[in-house]
Image: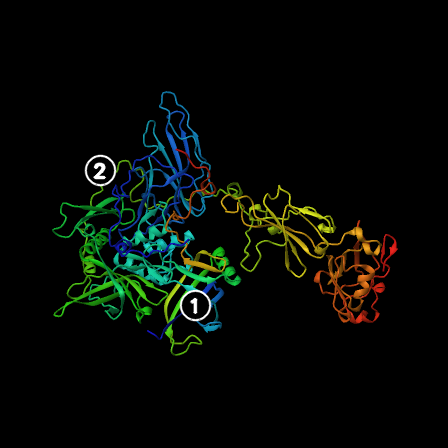
């Protein structure tokens, strides 16, 4: 138990383009994971929930409201970029300077940035699905004047 | 604001489909009237999606399309009415329908055309009905439609004639669709009609634009599609009601023995029963991935919730589905499912699958699943456990064993020992895991009781007669495979007539690193209105100073007007070194010679306040004067009139202004300045020695550049002096050796008289 440590890796991406890669364990250093560089950002993530129930599956991230952070999440929210959170578990007694090859991926969560709030110094980012549990969404198309003109009135 | 509550365990049976939702009982969806009046689509109605695939003798759906255009014309002699309708059958492209599958009311009649992505038929809409003498006039619609683009839709044209007096001219038309819209089937990656509900779910997810493709778990979707295909769970229906996608995915999953899951943030479906490699339902012994014991539990980490009685009582399920003959109109069927010897006379619960289910076995197995869960599942669990290897191995839907020792006496050991299915996993930031578990009941061989009952459930398989007495109204043959015609036209309305496009939006949004207000906008921060209530108490109320810039002179009588302050006024001399001298309290104060160089401060006992013992509120400042100066009247020479200075100069390329007093460091010439020009007395402080000679206006030690302008107050006005010495006055090395006031202020004149 005492040797168990968790690191979290956060990525904002869109298609094949990744905009930021942050990790919260290796303080003030960039580390390499999956052939990519992850810079340090002292964010905190709530627990990851896997469920079949509708709603209640969002993950919340608290992150310092630096210019880079505000800009990254403003763009993510405005342009529908995705956010991926990965949680790794490893032994803290072996090496704490870089991700270990033997670390275990215990949770992975990919979602949209659905809400951002906070204070002047801290942002609380909610990751989840824009699939709202309320409101009609399907069938997606509705009859319009362009499609059927002014229709027959019986 | 964020309110976070953890789901109560009592909700788990409802969330995972174990407990039944609130029932809405009514007529089966498939039991619509055949001879109802023809309906018309309205602007804003959802465009229906016909999703089906008839395989063998099963599948397909009867659609009752709405009309968008109509033409009504009668014969001027016989009064025979010809009705032409334009109908929208479905979104997307449907394979061509044979003539045997189109109906006017209950009868195969009419001339039909079918098209995709354009209007069917060439007739123009309108009401051309005339009154024929001796005949009953037709009462047809007058607003007959205008036509549209019919983009990405399958359309139909229907033309039929009715004799004088017929009451069938406005009956609803129906189309039996054997092959629905074409989608890319996930199982064989082929474009074509599908009856797999997973294909429909993927179609809706993608077309709704609500879920990015990256958030759909295609592997889970494929497994679920194979489960449905293998076990004969098919969707043959019309998706026409406006629904919430999330809610529909959950509900439709229950009717196909699937569970909507979100794993790693990605949507997918998982079978609700254990399955074999070949996607059949597993009825062998259930294996589990992990056993939780006392070793894993955290304090208070065990919570149990039993299923309430109302959800466990025996019931009879009336499953409604649709029997779909090959050559006739389908109709709703019911199959009652109950455990032998239970609920023979009810209670009954109704489940309507007739909108999409054309297979009785499908309906029976869904019923068996619901009944078996009611019968066997007794409780749910919530375990809060320490982190361990299962952090990375256990997934939603996995089976685990929970074996906890219950010790109520030394010799009375028992175990809470059950298998469970994982319904929810919460991996907390602290490392602990919370598992919500639903009991997986097994028999003495370790086989799932629910799976056994579902597999064993079989339908009676009896095909009922449709009850149709004859086919005399059919004008088209029931075995006529002739495809509908394809006459049609493309109407291309101008999109600008029905849309309003906004300019292309910006794609660069200001983030935290950019000022949100651009440089071209006025800076508003100085424009805020003052709030008098925010001001410090007191103010600058002293009357009486008569000198330059409000400086008091000797002999001035200072006072505070009663309209500004009605209390007792006290006076204090504030010396240039900061020391205070009490001058007493009175309504006025007369400035004396000792005050020269010092400031006079007035303060009061506050406004009248009967709540205090003194009758006055706390002391408040009433003002502080400028330093007291000598009176101009005592000067008797032009030079001695110089008692205040302003100097305007350029430093660091910026025009600066300083009003006296300012520091003149004149070294050994102090005496000369004081004696000859009297400027010590009148606000210019002379300090330092010869080596530090400099002029420091207002303490600004920056270099005074060339062409400085000196203004001197002569007692009546400010006089600007030009032609000042052109050197660098702060550069002591440059003028130490030539120190001379006449040099520094060369050609300085007052009122035409040179003073330097």
In the rendered image, the vertical position of residue B28 relative to residue B297, given as above or below: above
Which dot marks residue A9? 1
Across and down, in percent, residue B417 comes to 19, 66
Front: mark 2 or 1:
1
Which dot marks residue B469? 2
- Marks 2, 1 in one chain: no
Across and down, in percent, residue B642 comes to 80, 55
At 84% across and 69% down in the image, what residue appears? B738
Is residue B273 left or right of B568 when viewed as pictured?
left
Is residue B361 in view? yes
At 37% across and 61% down in the image, what residue appears? B217
* Label 1 packing within 10 angstroms: few (<14), some (14-19), many (20+): many
Quadrant containing the C terminus of chain B is bottom right
Is residue B512 left or right of B262 when viewed as pictured?
right
Tell me the subunit letter for badge 1: A
Could you say whether the residue bearing mark 1 is in a helix, strand or loop?
Answer: strand
Q: Name the image quarter holding residue B211.
A: bottom left
């Amino acid at each position: 138990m005492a040797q168990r440590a968790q690191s979290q890796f956060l990525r904002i991406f869109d298609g094949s383009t990744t905009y930021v890669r942050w990790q919260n364990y290796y303080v003030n250093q960039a580390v390499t994971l999956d052939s990519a560089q992850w810079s340090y950002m002292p964010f905190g993530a709530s627990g990851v929930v896997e469920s079949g129930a509708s709603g209640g599956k969002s993950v919340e991230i608290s992150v310092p409201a630096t210019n880079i952070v505000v800009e990254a999440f403003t763009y993510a929210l405005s342009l529908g970029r995705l956010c991926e959170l990965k949680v790794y578990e490893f032994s803290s007694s072996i090496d704490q300077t870089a991700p270990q090859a033997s670390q275990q991926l215990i949770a992975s969560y990919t979602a949209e940035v659905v809400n951002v709030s906070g204070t002047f110094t801290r942002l609380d980012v909610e990751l989840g699905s824009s699939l709202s549990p309320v409101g009609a969404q399907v069938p997606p198309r509705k009859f319009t004047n362009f499609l059927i003109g002014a229709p027959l009135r019986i | 604001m964020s309110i976070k509550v953890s789901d109560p365990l009592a909700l788990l049976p409802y969330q995972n489909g174990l407990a039944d939702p609130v029932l809405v009982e009514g007529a089966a969806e498939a039991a619509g009237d055949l001879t109802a009046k023809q309906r018309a689509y309205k602007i804003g109605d959802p465009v229906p999606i016909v999703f089906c695939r008839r395989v063998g003798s099963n599948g397909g759906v009867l659609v009752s399309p709405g009309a968008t255009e109509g033409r009504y014309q009668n014969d001027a002699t016989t009064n025979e009415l010809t009705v032409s309708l334009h109908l929208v059958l479905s979104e997307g492209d449907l394979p061509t329908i044979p003539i045997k599958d189109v109906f006017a009311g209950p009868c195969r009649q009419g001339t039909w055309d079918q098209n995709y992505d354009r209007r069917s038929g060439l007739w123009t809409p309108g009401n051309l009905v005339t009154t024929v003498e001796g005949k009953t006039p037709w009462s047809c619609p007058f607003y007959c439609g205008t036509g549209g683009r019919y983009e990405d839709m399958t359309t139909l044209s229907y033309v039929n004639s009715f004799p004088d007096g017929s009451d069938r001219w406005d009956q609803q038309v129906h189309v039996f669709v054997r092959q629905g819209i074409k989608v890319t089937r996930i199982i064989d990656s082929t474009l074509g009609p599908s009856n797999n509900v997973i294909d429909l779910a993927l179609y809706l997810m993608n077309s709704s634009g609500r879920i990015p493709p990256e958030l759909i778990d295609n592997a889970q979707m494929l497994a679920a599609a194979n489960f449905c295909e293998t076990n004969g769970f098919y969707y043959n229906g019309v998706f026409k009601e406006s629904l919430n996608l999330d809610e529909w995915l959950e509900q439709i999953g229950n009717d196909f023995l699937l569970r909507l899951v979100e794993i790693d943030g990605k949507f997918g479906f998982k079978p609700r029963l254990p399955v074999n490699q070949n996607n059949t339902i597993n009825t062998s012994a259930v294996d589990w991935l992990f056993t939780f014991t006392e070793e894993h539990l955290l304090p208070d980490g065990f919570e149990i919730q039993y299923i309430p009685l109302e959800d466990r009582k025996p019931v009879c399920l009336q499953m409604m589905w649709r029997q779909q003959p090959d050559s006739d109109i389908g109709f709703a069927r019911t199959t009652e499912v109950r455990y032998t010897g239970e609920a023979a006379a009810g209670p009954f619960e109704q489940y309507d699958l007739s909108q999409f289910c054309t297979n009785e076995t499908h309906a029976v197995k869904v019923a068996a699943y619901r009944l078996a869960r009611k019968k066997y599942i007794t409780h749910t669990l919530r375990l809060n456990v320490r982190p361990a290897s299962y952090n990375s191995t256990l997934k939603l839907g996995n089976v685990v064993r929970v074996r906890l020792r219950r010790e109520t006496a030394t010799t009375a050991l028992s175990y809470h020992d059950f298998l469970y299915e994982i319904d929810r996993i919460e991996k907390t930031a602290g490392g602990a895991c919370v598992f919500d578990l639903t009991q997986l009941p097994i028999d003495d061989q370790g086989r799932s009781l629910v799976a056994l009952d579902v597999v064993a459930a079989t339908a009676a398989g009896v095909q009922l007669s449709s009850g149709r007495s004859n086919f005399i109204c059919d004008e088209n043959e029931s075995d006529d495979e002739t495809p509908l015609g394809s006459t049609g036209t493309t109407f291309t309305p101008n999109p600008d007539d029905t849309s309003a496009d906004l300019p292309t939006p910006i794609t660069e949004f200001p983030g935290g690193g950019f000022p949100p207000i651009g440089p071209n906008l006025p800076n508003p921060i100085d424009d805020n209105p003052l709030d008098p209530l925010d001001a410090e108490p007191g103010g600058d109320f002293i009357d009486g100073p008569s000198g330059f810039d409000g400086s008091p002179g000797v002999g001035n009588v200072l006072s505070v007007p009663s309209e500004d302050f009605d209390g007792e006024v006290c006076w204090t001399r504030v010396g240039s070194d900061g020391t205070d001298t009490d001058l007493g309290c009175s309504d006025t104060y007369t400035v004396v010679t000792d005050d020269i160089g010092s400031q006079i401060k007035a303060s009061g006992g506050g406004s009248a306040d009967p709540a205090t013992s003194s009758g006055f509120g706390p002391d408040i400042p009433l003002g502080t004067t400028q330093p007291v100066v000598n009176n101009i009247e005592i000067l008797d020479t032009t030079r001695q009139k110089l008692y205040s200075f302003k100097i305007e100069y350029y430093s660091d390329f910026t025009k600066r202004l300083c009003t006296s007093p300012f520091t003149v460091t004149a070294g050994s010439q102090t005496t000369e300045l004081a004696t000859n020009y009297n400027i010590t007395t009148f606000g210019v402080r002379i300090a330092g020695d010869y080596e530090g000679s400099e002029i420091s206006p207002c303490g600004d030690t920056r270099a005074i550049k060339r062409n400085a302008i000196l203004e001197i107050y002569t007692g009546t006005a400010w006089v600007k002096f030009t032609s000042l010495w052109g050197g660098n006055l702060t550069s002591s090395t440059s003028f130490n050796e030539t120190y001379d006031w006449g040099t520094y202020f060369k050609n300085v004149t007052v009122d035409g008289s040179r003073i330097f």
